[in-house]
Image: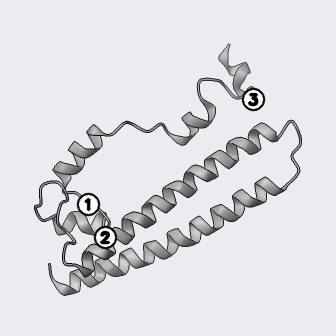
Amino acid sequence: MKENTLNKLKSVLLKRRQEMLQQVAHLEFEREELEQHAIEPIDSAQIENLALLIRKLDDRGKEEIGEIELALTKMSSDRYGVCELCGKSIPIKRLKVLPATRFCRNCAQKYESAQTPRNHHRDEIIGDELLDEYRHLNG
């Protein structure tokens, strides 16, 4: 990989890491604010759901920061751009779109299909029950 391309990708990763660090700090502040305020009994369920959502977003942000840190470490050890599963070079086009990726496209598809599917955060919060304000729409 050309040094110029590597430097550009490193710059993108560093910028994204800074953005995520700020986002995580903000989410942690928001979560602490929610936990400190007195809660009306009616609002407690909504506040609890919001706190859960913030926690999940916070966890995802921390996960992304970890992925970025791994990519930066690989850059410094000349292992960046190499698929962790098959050992082949990850195409530059893929790295430009997903600079922290660990896998080539084929291996990423295999890896993702082997993972347990995650529910969307709203599915985890709401589950099968309808929110009260939508019950009248159910017929």
Q: Is residue 116 left or right of residue 31?
A: left
* Amino acid type, label 2: Ala
- Residue under label 3, please give it: 133
Q: Earlier in the sequence, mark 1 or mark 3?
A: 1
Residue 122: quadrant of the picture? top right
Where disc 3 sits, the SS reads: helix
- Residue under label 2, please give it: 71
Q: Position of residue 73 (x, y in %)?
A: 31, 75
> Mark 1–mark 2 contact, CB under 8 Å?
yes
> Mark 1–mark 3 contact, CB under 8 Å?
no
* Amino acid type, label 1: Arg
Q: Position of residue 98 (x, y in %)?
A: 31, 63
The residue under the point 50% across, 62% down is 62
Residue 113: quadrant of the picture? top left
Q: Residues within 10 Å of mark 3 (few under 14, many from 20)?
A: few
Residue 101: quadrant of the picture? bottom left
Q: Residues within 10 Å of mark 2 (few under 14, many from 20)?
A: many
Q: Residues within 10 Å of mark 1 (few under 14, many from 20)?
A: many
Where disc 1 sits, the SS reads: loop
> Mark 3–mark 2 contact, CB under 8 Å?
no
Cα separation, mark 1 vs mark 2, equals 8 Å
* Amino acid type, label 3: Glu
- Residue under label 1, please give it: 102
Q: Earlier in the sequence, mark 3 or mark 2?
A: 2
The residue under the point 41% across, 78% down is 14
Where disc 2 sits, the SS reads: helix
Q: Position of residue 35 (x, y in %)?
A: 78, 53
The residue under the point 30% across, 77% down is 9
Q: Position of residue 85 (x, y in %)?
A: 17, 54
Cα separation, mark 3 vs mark 2, equals 45 Å
Where, quadrant-wise, is the C terminus in this rendering? top right
